[in-house]
Amino acid sequence: MEPKFQSNKLSRTLASCLLVAVFGALAGWATTQGLLIKSLFIGMAALLALPLFSQNRPITIVSLQKGLLYLVIIAGFIGPALLAIGVGPIHLFPYRILLLVLWMVFAISVLFNHGRVSVSHMKVKSYLQFLALWLIYAVLSLAWAMSKADAIRQFIFLFMAASIIFFVIYYFSNGKDLKRFYYLWLGVFGGLLLLGIWEHFAGQHLPVSGSYAETRARFMFLPTAVFLNTNDYATFLALSIPFALGVLRYARNRLVRFIGLGAAAAAFYLIIVAGSRGNMLAVLLEVAFLMLFLTNLRQRAKVAVAATVCLAMAVFLLPGPVQELSSEVTGELSSISTQAELGTGSVPVRANLVRNGLFFLASTAGFGVGAGNAEYWMANSAIFETRGVLNPHNWWLEILINYGIFVFVGYILFYLGLVLTMWRVHRRTKNRGEKMICEALLVALVGFFLASVSSSSIMAFKPQWLLFAFALAFLNYQRRGRLEGVA
């Protein structure tokens, strides 16, 4: 039996009051500091979190951990944007603090259970085993890593990523939790989308943004939301667009479907504004995959007719903005080949980063330079010019350089195995709600292949790990259902 707190009604009331007090204090502090946008986001986080503590059911250790997990997810999306406290060489913010608290409560629950942890309901152990081996390899790489500090820092990031994946799979074992996760993602997506639109038109940013206090018109109106730079924000949008498309395809209410379409279109517009070519290509890949592999001929015809009508109306009503937007998209995408031919811009730099990375890999006999040491080697051992750029700017290359061939191949198998398995689940799933969740996750995972090369590094990019956590939790739910059905 799960241990319960005394006086559940009183516990719920106290938990709700504590939550309101904490968020209220944070919002009050932000308001007194003149940080209106920050106070609004603290209030939004409170609205998202409060229902988790107000459900009319007994408060158990497990339900407390679930509530904490929801808060960790919310804090993971927001990152250090609301409250970051410098403690020596590290920064503490809600995500890290809440994840630590979650581990502490989990340890208490293990003690209540006489030191036993039941994982019989986890049917995706092969994926978790790879993450465990990756962590072990990261520790072993300390033996040859030139920069021990960078290696330890990246191990911490990797451990936090593996932790959130483990907890989501462990606790989100039923359909209701997965639906809440889906709607939570949509809620965060909507909030950050509105913030990005505000930034684009008002030129105001949160202090965490690299564009904060920027006065140059070229950068002043670039959206970053709760992220440091535009590429990270664009990557989040590219991974979130499939969730809006899922609502568009599977919601029964026409207004809700229209909102989903509008959100997806607005997000793609902000990606264009951000000038993130990798994420533009990622969204185009997502749409192409959705149309070619997840729809039938009749659905494709409907989409083609609807798209043609909408485009004709847009050209007729707004010829200037449509032409300008089309030119901007064409220019950004064509610049990739132009920069490669002329040897200018970021394309040749990225090519030299790849060349250096392969040289480092060969220099370490395929074992990699050690966790988090790619930048150190790029600064001290590069043989190809990178114009001061040290980060690989390619997630796949970063894994290969840091962890070598074995972890890289394991990660490729991890990723492809998840995509192919989710595709098979999508084909056999009949439940409308489950199909919507599966499709959104599958399309986002496909888009991740290109979206992941846009940012300088996504090891500490929480939406990436939340996406994998969500996908594995859904796959675990499906496997449990099939096994129970057979039994």
Image: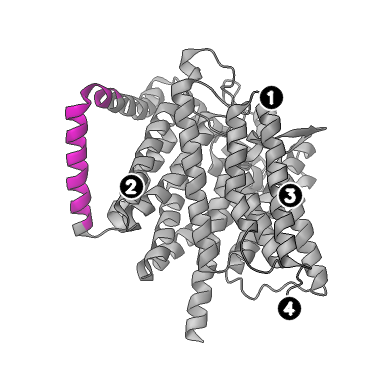
Which residue is at a point 50% across and 76% down the rendered structure image? 481
Colour scheme of the picture: one colour
**Dot 4 or dot 3, earlier in sequence:** 4
- The amino acid sitting under disc 1 is Gln
Whether 357 is drawn above or below 102: the answer is above
What's the magenta region? 299-324
Distance from disc 1 to disc 4, alpha carbons, whole Å, reads 47 Å
Label placed on residue 287: 2
Residue 336 quadrant:
top left
Label placed on residue 1: 4
- The amino acid sitting under disc 2 is Val
Front tag of 1 and 3? 3
- The amino acid sitting under disc 3 is Leu
Distance from disc 3 to disc 2, alpha carbons, whole Å, reads 44 Å
Task: Find residue 294 and report its horizontal and vertical position in percent.
Answer: 31, 58
Q: Can residue 164 be seen in this view?
A: yes
Q: Dot 4: what SS?
A: loop
Reading the image, the residue beneath label 1 is 33
Task: Find residue 418 and report its horizontal and vertical position in percent.
Answer: 49, 60
Q: Do the residues labelled 4 and 3 touch (CB within 8 Å)?
A: no
Q: Are marks 1 and 4 in contact (CB under 8 Å)?
A: no
Which residue is at a point 22% across and 42% down the rendered structure image? 307
